[in-house]
Each structure stands twice: as C-alpha cells, then as structure tokens.
Amino acid sequence: MFNPEIPTKVLVIGGGPAGHAAATTAARFGAKVTLVEDQIVGGAAHLLDCIPSKAMVSSSMRMRAIRNAESLGISEQGPVGVDMGLLSDRASRIAETLSGSTTDLLESQGVEIIRGRAHFTDAHTATAVTEDGSVHLEFDRAVIATGSRPRVPQWAPLDGQRVITTRDAYHLEELPERIVIVGSGVTGVEMVHIFSSLGSEVALLVSRHHVLPHRDAEVATVLEEDFLIRGVELLKGSRAANIEREGDVVKVMTEDGRTVRGSHALLAVGSVPNSENLGLDELGIAVDHGFIEVDEFQRTTVPHIYAAGDVTGQMLLSSVATAQGTKIARHILGHEVAPIDYRKVAQAIFTSPEIASVGLEEVDAAAEGRKVRITKVPLAPNPRAVIQGETGGFVKVVSDPATRVVLGGTIVGHHASELIGSIAVATNARLSVDILVETLMVHPSLTESIAEAAE
C-alpha cells in the first residue's frame, strides 16, 4: 500500500528501460513523477542498438533460411537480394513503434515527460534544458538512468559511412562488400552473424584466443565452427591499433603488424556510460571509470539519488535495467525490496546458433572450485532439430550433486533464447533436476533435450 508519509516527488533522468520502469511504477503507487529525456523515449541503447540489431538478426536468419531451403525440399525460384533501405526502414519503424508505446504508457500513468537534457543544481533541484529554454525541477528522490553509447577509440576515424559503430550499421544504404568487425564480444559476434547471413564477406578481429572471451570455451568453439562454415575470416590474437580510410577502402592495422582491408570497418568495442554533465561531482556522487557506483538497492553515494541501467555498468541488459528501475520505485515508496541476484539473470546472444545461459556456468564453477554435476546432451539427435535442419549445439544443465537443485544451464542452438526460460525458472525457484526430468515435454520439440540433459 502507498504510504502518504513517503516523499512523493520523483525525478527520473533518462527514459530507457530503467527510467521508464522506475517512472511508471512510482506513478502507479501515487508519486508525482517527472521524466526528462533528450533523445528517444524508450532508451537510445535499447531502441537504437538492441531492437534494430534483433530486427536485422531476424531478417538475416530468413535470408540464410532461404539460401538453405533446398536442403528442406524447397527449390529456389530465382535470386534473392538484400535491400538495405528496406531493412533500415523496418528497424526504424520498429523502434518508433516501441517508443510510441512507451510514451503512451508513461502518459497514461500521469508521468510528466520533458524533452531535454537535465543536470543537478543541488541535492534536491535540477534544471532541464529544452528547445524552449530551461525548466526548474524540485524533487524528493531522483533516479539517474541515462544509459550508454558505443565506445569509439581515439584511433578510429568514425565517419558513419565506412568506419561505423553498430548504430550506423542499421542505416547503411548498401550492403558492405567486405566488412572488418573489430571486437569479438557479444555485439561483435552478432554483427558477424548479421552481415555474413546477408551476404557480406566478413573478417573478425579476435584479440584473445577465442570469441566471447568471458564465456565457456565450448560455447565459443561451436560459434567459431559456424563462422568458418560461413567463410568468415577469423584473425585471432589481433588487436586493432589504427584505422585508415582511402576512398572506398578501409584499412585496419593491428598491434602485431597486420593490415586487414575491407569496404567497411565496424567498431564493437564496448560502451561508454552517459554520466557526463549531470552535476555528479558537485553532489559528491561517486563514479568509477564513468559508471555510477550504487549499493544493492541502487542508491548512489547520495542516498536519496538512485541510478540504474547501463550507466551503472551492472550487466548491460534491458531486462536487468527494467528490474532495477522497478525495484528503485518500490524502495523509494517504502516497500520491502530484495536485491537482484545477478547470477540468476537469463541472457542470450542472437547468433546462429543462438547462445543462452542462466545461473552458474561450468567455467564459473571451475574458477570457484565448486563441486557441481554437469550433464550435457547434443541437439543433433533431437527429432525437432533434425526436422528443422538445425542440429548444431547442445543443452547443458548444472546442478548440485548433493541436493540435486538446478544451479544453471547453457543452451546453444536454434531458439536457445526461448528455451532457456525453463532452466531459468528452475534456477530461480531452486527446483530439483527431477522436476525437469518428470515434466512431459511436447514431442517433437527442442525442450525434450532439456529433460534429457537433466536426466
């Protein structure tokens, strides 16, 4: 129940997943909420990075399916091409639709939306700079949810045409003939999937021994094998040091002396928090390399000011940002809130095959010296996988050998992002592997392999 004694004037800076969740939740409980956003309601990182990339993944998967249609008994009737303009328009329409829906939701809850850039002037006031001037804002509690942006190294002459970030990639007028992707983390491998599926030649600079350096090496192996089948050039142990453009040719120079040429170079080297020009130093709000420091309840070093989402650097996922924003609003309004257990967050990489995981991974258990039981089954014999012609990958379940409680799992394969939900529920509810084994799954279905791995 809403407590009228709790301060109710809430300022939210940033309208992404964290900000909009905090604003709508606080408004539902009766708080007076003002949200300030200077770019796109719904979040730039969410709507200009995450959503367009998944729209492009969807299109690229269909392109690959068309190319492989003959193996499923479907004859090609003619050449299939890629219209980058149509792809870009589709991604933009999806982002605009979702932004409009988010705006409608905020307004339906009575949230005041100010289009502008806000900064703190003291501990309980802020100024929003808009096209029409400045707006003075007073607040009892504030939430910083300003998100992040792609990182651009000083040695990269970004021009938005040939030397690009992921945000530029969704608005190219033509499909790159050969694209050099710098960065082999989650974003980098998704970009490899997109452009190789659409028909570009792709070279990937891998600075470590394998792609996805912070993930299970077995997962990386499956992905690299798929990349090689696609004809992707993997340059391992290559860290970019400089980029030069000569007309329509882009040259990427590496620290070990190699030069990789392409028609385009795409930077996928992490993100930078949008924490500048907010007045944080004046208030004594601590930051670490630009990321705002918070406690388990998302409070900054100024306790009545909270922060959530990418600007905190805590698992840069929209689902996490939304959960943080919701919990902040409940905490502000006096509700009992449990801190987020980040180890139990389900996450996915939208490549082909997809990669999804939740809870304790094998590599984590080994690092901690923890005794676990790991059971794994390949998808190759799964009837549904055979029918779909997508037999690559596996299901791995991690459990406690003493209690048989599910601790986590990893799925590599078609629709892994959807399948991981069963293991996520089991992990969060601390269910026994026996529950998964005894659950009668649909036949034929990929979920049968989850029960097999649990067994």
Image (cartoon, helix red, strand yellow):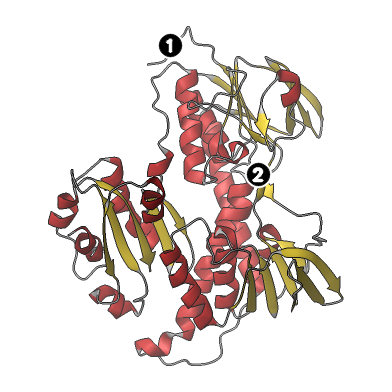
Task: Kindly identify which residue carries mark 1.
Answer: 3
Precedes in sequence: disc 2 or disc 1: 1
Rendering coords of residue 407 (x, y %): 29, 47
Residue 273 shows in the view: yes
| Label 2 SS | strand
- Please name whichever residue, 226 or 317, is drawn nearer the observer in this view of the structure: 226
The answer to whether 417 is drawn above or below residue 251 in the figure is above
**Other-residue count near label 1 (Cα within 10 Å), few / some / many at <14 / 14–19 / ≥20:** few
- Can you tell which mark lies on residue 87? none
Task: Kindly identify which residue carries mark 2.
Answer: 148
Amino acid type at mark 2 = Ser
> Nearer the viewer's eye, disc 2 or disc 1?
2
The answer to whether 327 is drawn above or below residue 304 in the figure is below
Q: Marks 1 and 2: in contact by CB < 8 Å?
A: no
Q: In this view, does 58 lie to the left or right of 43?
A: left
Q: In this view, does 434 lie to the left or right of 48?
A: left
Residue drawn at x 12%, y 55% is 438
Rendering coords of residue 173 (x, y %): 72, 71
Amino acid type at mark 1 = Asn
Residue 29 shows in the view: no
| Label 1 SS | loop
Rendering coords of residue 455 (x, y %): 17, 60
Rendering coords of residue 166 (x, y %): 66, 60
Residue drawn at x 58%, y 48% is 46
Q: In which quarter of the image is the N terminus?
A: top left
Residue drawn at x 47%, y 31% is 326
Query: Which quadrant would residue 68 be assigned to in this image?
Result: bottom left
**Other-residue count near label 2 (Cα within 10 Å), few / some / many at <14 / 14–19 / ≥20:** many
Which residue, as the protein is rendered here, is positioned at the far front?
369
